[in-house]
Image (cartoon, rainbow, N blue to C red):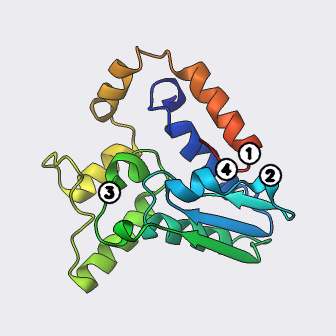
Amino acid sequence: SPMAYLDPEYPVWRAKLDMLRRCDLGDVLIVGDSRAAVDLMPALLPVPVTNLAVGGGMPIEAYIAVSRALACQAAPHQVIVSLDAAHFAAADLFWERSVRYGFVGLADLARLRRWQRETHDASLAVPKRPDGLPVRLRAWLYASRFPPLYFSSLAQGGGLLRVWRNQAAFAETLAARGQYF
C-alpha cells in the first residue's frame, strides 16, 4: 500500500480524495494551495466545511476537485478558492504530487491533453525533474504504481516504516475535515 512508503504529504492528499469520493463535503468547499490548506480550519467555522486545498495546489487541482464535488448529489452550496498568483503561471508539483498521489487520474489527464492541444499549452507535459517519458506512458505508470517510480520514496522512508505515521496523518486529516499543518 502506498501508505506504507509514500511521502508524509501523501496521506493528506489521500484523505481529501477519500472525502471527495464519498461526497462528504458539507455546505462549503475550500480548494486551493498550501496557504488555504493550513489557514482555513473547518472546525472553527459555523457551518459544515471541507478543506480540499493541497500543498502545491494549482488551478487544475481546484478545478478537478470542484467539478467532482458539483457532481455529488449533495453538492456544496459555496466554494472558496484560494490560490497564490504564482500557481497560475507555472506547473509546480503536478506530476510529483497530483498524479503520483492519484488525485489526478487517467481520465483527468486525457481531458487535460485535449485542452493542451486546443490551447497549445504544454506546461503540464513535463515534470519538474524531466524523466524523458512520454506523457501517456508516465501517466499509465503512475496509475499502475509502477515500482521504479516509487523506489526513492521507499528508500527514503526506510522501507515500509512510514505506514503508522501515514495512517495517523490520514485519520487526523479526516478528523480535521481536510485542514492540516
* Disc 1/disc 3 C-alpha distance (Å): 26 Å
Question: In which quadrant will I find the C terminus?
Answer: top right
> Is there a contact, CB below 8 Å, between mark 4 and mark 1?
yes
Q: Residue at x 41, y 59 (%)?
A: 106
First in residue order: circle 4 vs circle 2: 2
- Disc 1 marks a residue whose amino acid type is Ala
The residue that mark 2 highlights is: 43
Residue 21 in the image: above or below residue 100: below
Answer left or right for 93 relative to 125: right
The residue that mark 4 highlights is: 178
Q: Nearer the viewer, mark 4 or mark 2?
A: 2
Say the numbered circle drawn on residue 92: 3
Answer left or right for 91 relative to 50: left
- Disc 4 marks a residue whose amino acid type is Gly
The residue that mark 1 highlights is: 176
* Disc 2/disc 3 C-alpha distance (Å): 29 Å
Secondary structure at badge 4 equals loop
